[in-house]
Amino acid sequence: MLHLLMLCFLGDSSANPLLPNRHLNQAVHIAPIAVQRIGDRIAVRVSKEALGKPMLWFIQLDGPETSNGYTVRSCNSIQVRWELRKDNLELISTNPKRSNPLETEDHVVKAFAIASRTDSDSISADVTDILYGKVPAFSPAWTLQSTGFDLDRTRVLQLINDRDGFHTAIHTVFQRSDGPGIAGDVLTSLVLLPEKPLSRIGPDPRIGYITSKCPSGECIRRFRLLKQHPEQPISRPVKPIVFEISQEIPNRWRPYIRRAVENWNAAFQQSGFVGAVECRVAPTLTSDPTWNPADLHRNVIRWSKGTGENATGYSIPDPRSGESICAKVVIGEKVIDLFSRQYFVQVSGAGKPPNVWPLPEAIQGRILQYVVEHELGHVFGLDHNSLASSVFSVANLRDQGFTDRYGDVASVMSYGRFNYVAQPSDGCPSIPILGAYDRFALRYAYEPGAANQPDRFFAPLKARPDLRYGESGPSNQPSDDPDTQWDKVGRETLLATELGVRNLRRVSENLNALPTSARNLLGDAVCTQWETELGHVVGLIGGIRGAQAVSGPPGPVSRSEQLGAIGFVGDHIVNDIACLEGMSPTGCNRAVENVLTNLFDSRRVKRMANAQTISFAELFKKIGDAITSQGPSSKADFLSNAYEKTLTRVILNRDLPSECRNEAKQAIARLDRELLGRAGNDRSKVPSRA
Ligand SMILES: [Zn+2]
């Protein structure tokens, strides 16, 4: 939270302050819009020239943890304008139409009674209600299931006016009907939008950009980065993109964050800019009491204390053009824990980190740098590119010369993480670096004229898989395309997974040297990683490769690959289960059950039924044979139970094709026969079913 001690006003407070005020009028000549505290009220003053001009209103909540696990949350950004209508100053919002987001419609947010018309032709009105949360769309109360501000415990921390807008910080306690109030700071920033909207660049399916639906059409997000010397191939920008590291970020992490920002300069150089981005530490509130992290003029990197193991980076767009007006990055401090676990289980088997937990600070910092580089990619407009982590061959990933130069993925915007393919003798670096795709993709938005000649721009894709983009399906579902999967590294999926599982076995041995708490934590993470890697192989079964395929031609995955994948999954479930159980019995059970569930994901089953590349009989037979191939043991019983539960779910799912459900019935009958045979036809010895 801000905890500002100083209040910053424009003009004086007085007994009847909304009357014309000479001192205030001078300021209005500087600013087209300004706020002023007047007793316990807040007034806005709009100059006549600012009436009708588009502005952006941004709201951020600082302090309490909300449902997304962060203690800093951006709640809304809304295009608005002020209009004079009879005796009211109206705040009008411009919103995308529900029926067609490319069109907009206006709504009156609130009509404020005019308090004064000054001799300089500006208009004042009391806007306390909107800043005190009484207009739901302009309040963060919804993020806390709050009924509104407790006005007795609300106070103004900051009212700042600048050349084209104002920024406020208001401390309040959010009232809740089902519990105690929650304290937090509501940060608001209102600025004029650029006089001339940025020219539109539309999206292209060959490159991954975050887009905005604008009246001129769908626009990619990008900053207004212009060359000082447009005639030169490389020039400094007219105005660099400056990031500020917020004061709450611990000192020890700041160098890594600064490096993450500055590393993007090399990528921007390929777009023709030198010094495109800069990084500095934000002032303390003592040295600059006007600093406000929600300020739409500032690109700010914040630190969140919430429980969320995540980070987020986003730009706030001009709704008319998609231009990034500013950027906000929020790093959840626990994201370092998440990625440290992933790093440990993915690469310590190849002898990477010293076998200690927590990881040394230098490795944690390098991991944080990677996380921030990824979030900054979003800030610059880039979307995820999962294809970029399936591009490099296993041979490349095991070649130190290659990985030193190109990294383990072709883009930090992929969800490929650390190099789990490399083996102990390979000595390859593990943490992603900005890749060829990142540099190429940035050019589409920032190299002057590049997007005007798309066919020429995209011509290199034919020979350069590392420049290709691909992402398929919602993030909460298994991907249709085996080449665009999250957390995957390497082109040859079976071989990459085989090597990854070998590393996991080595990790499991290394864990024995660690204290129990670390062993339990990381043992569970080993099981999760195993499930993830097996999931990549499952992705081949019923998989459909897209137009940007890197591992095979577009269309259904070949029959031989699918059969190979089924065999691989069956063998590994049976052969790895003892190792996984040694790591974490609950983690092992969860991982195996999830892999079986993933195998019969309804979308996968439907794709299989459509493509008819392999039959359901083949799938059930191979998996069933593997499950029943073990001798009697508690784990064998667990596996057969888990498989039967999965089959039962398939049979009961009327949404699935009947041929699949019929085969599942036969598979259960076959499983029963096998188990009975194993028990010497003594039904009492058949494991009881959960
Ligand atoms: Zn992301």
Image (tube, rainbow, N blue to C red):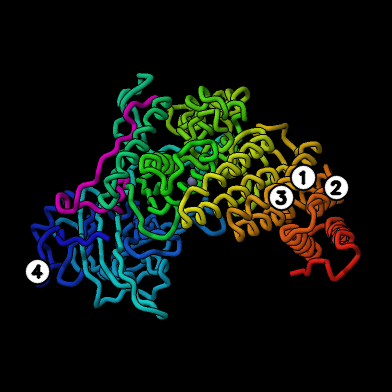
Q: Which mark is residue 618?
A: 2
> Ligand 1 near label 1 (Cβ, under 8 Å)?
no
Residue wearing tag 3: 573
Residue 216 image position (x, y, % from top left): 49, 44
Circles 1 and 2: CB atoms closer than 8 Å: yes
Circle 2 SS class: helix
In this orientation, does residue 379 appear?
no
Q: Which residue is mark 4?
A: 14
Cα separation, mark 4 vs mark 1, equals: 79 Å
CA gap, disc 2 and disc 3 = 17 Å
Which marked residue is nearer to the observer: mark 3 or mark 1?
3
Residue 566 has which mark?
A: 1
Q: Which residues are magenta?
A: 272-300
Tag 2: residue type? Answer: Glu
Q: Is 105 situated left or right of 63 in this image? A: right
The nearer-to-camera label among 3 and 4 is 3
**Label 4: how many Cα within 10 Å (few below 14, some 14–19, many 20+):** few
Quarter that holds the N terminus = bottom left
x, y percentage for residue 547?
A: 67, 35
Q: Of helix, strand and loop, which mostly describes the magenta segment?
A: loop
Q: Mark 1 falls on what kind of element?
A: helix
Look at the numbered disc 4 and give the secondary structure of its residue: loop
**Mark 4 vs mark 1: which is more N-terminal?**
4
Q: Residues within 10 Å of mark 2 (few under 14, many from 20)?
A: few
Q: Does label 3 or label 4 sit earlier along the sequence?
A: 4
